């Protein structure tokens, strides 16, 4: 395995076979699906569209596209599709595939969507070009990834310390890097896409909310790696977990930046 491919999709930290991993993924879906589906609906996803959902997880967005947006077909791709083995609506095709593989070329689509995938991959610039090339003329590429809001000016609390340590741990173990995510609009323009735009949503950290439970589960899954950074100790880790169930967490969850761009219907004149 080449070094730049180590930890693809984050399996080294979040292994599909781990107990509770499907539940953790579903918590993320509960936290972010409403935002993703609203954007896909606004972009016009509907009948006649053939869609590719990269890193489909437990398939919540693929099923929404078919059952609520009434698209014609969805190809749901993941390196491990064990969470996509049941409840297939008509039009859903599941493919076990590695999008970093040189021979990954599943066809052409009206919509190519990837959420919380590229941030874990070291070859993200090449993959943006690859995903853009899978669009039919007039098709749209939609990419969503995390943006870190625990900036240097944020108050230093157990929560912010653990969140910063989490990003460092993910970078050290699987190469996760969210520093480039705000560049998405320019990266899509570089690929020749047009009508490019982006938005950021930050779900509130409320007690027992899906996003609070998602981050608690995520921290617990990589607890050893977080502590190994040396940025937090056991007491601070425990205090950060407690803050997620406090009546007033008073902190910002990482945001989700979604960017999109359309492949021109006609090649520009030279």
Image (cartoon, rainbow, N blue to C red):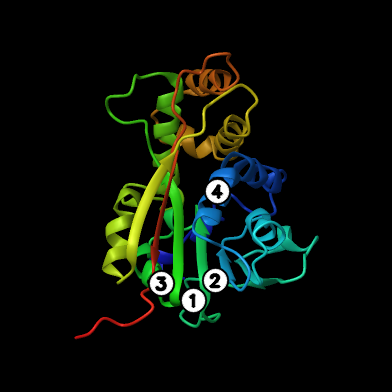
Query: Mark 1 or mark 4, which is nearer to you?
Result: 4
Q: Which residue is mark 2?
A: 98
Q: CA distance from mark 4 to mark 3?
A: 22 Å
Mark 3 or mark 2, earlier in chain: 2
- Which mark identifies residue 132? 3
Q: CA distance from mark 3 to mark 2?
A: 16 Å
Query: Mark 2 or mark 4, which is nearer to you?
Result: 4
Residue found at x 38% / y 38%: 148
Q: Secondary structure at mark 1?
A: loop
- Which mark identifies residue 38? 4
- Which mark identifies residue 156? none
- In which quarter of the view is residue 88 placed? bottom right
Q: CA distance from mark 3 to mark 1?
A: 16 Å
Q: Secondary structure at mark 4?
A: helix
Above or below, 191 relative to 228: below
Mark 4 or mark 3, earlier in chain: 4
Quarter occupied by the C terminus: bottom left
Mark 1 near mark 4, Cβ–Cβ under 8 Å?
A: no
Residue 119 seen in the figure? yes
Q: CA distance from mark 1 to mark 4?
A: 31 Å
Residue nearer the viewer, 253 or 170? 253
Mark 3 near mark 2, Cβ–Cβ under 8 Å?
A: no
Residue nearer the viewer, 158 or 231? 158
Mark 1 near mark 2, Cβ–Cβ under 8 Å?
A: yes
């Amino acid at each position: 395995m080449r070094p730049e491919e180590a930890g693809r999709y984050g399996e080294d930290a979040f292994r599909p076979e781990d107990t509770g991993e499907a539940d953790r993924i579903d918590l993320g879906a509960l936290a972010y699906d409403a935002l993703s589906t609203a954007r896909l609906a606004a972009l016009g996803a509907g009948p006649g569209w053939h869609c590719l959902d990269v890193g489909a997880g437990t398939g919540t967005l693929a099923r929404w596209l078919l059952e609520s947006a009434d698209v014609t077909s969805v190809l749901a791709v993941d390196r491990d599709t064990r969470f996509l083995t049941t409840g297939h609506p008509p039009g859903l095709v599941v493919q076990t595939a590695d999008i970093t593989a040189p021979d990954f070329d599943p066809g052409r689509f009206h919509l190519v969507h990837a959420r919380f995938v590229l941030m874990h991959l070291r070859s993200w610039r090449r993959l943006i070009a690859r995903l853009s090339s899978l669009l039919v003329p007039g098709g749209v590429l939609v990419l969503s990834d995390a943006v870190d809001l625990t900036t240097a000016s944020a108050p230093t609390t157990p929560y912010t310390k653990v969140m910063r340590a989490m990003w460092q741990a993910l970078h050290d173990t699987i190469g996760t890097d969210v520093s480039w995510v705000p560049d998405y609009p320019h990266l899509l323009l570089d690929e020749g896409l047009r009508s490019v735009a982006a938005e950021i949503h930050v779900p509130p950290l409320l007690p027992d909310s899906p996003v609070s439970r998602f981050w608690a589960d995520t921290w617990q899954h990589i607890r050893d790696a977080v502590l190994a950074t040396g940025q937090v100790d056991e007491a601070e880790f425990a205090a950060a977990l407690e803050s997620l169930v406090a009546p007033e967490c008073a902190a910002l969850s990482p945001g989700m930046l979604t960017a999109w761009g359309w492949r021109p219907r006609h090649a520009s004149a030279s």
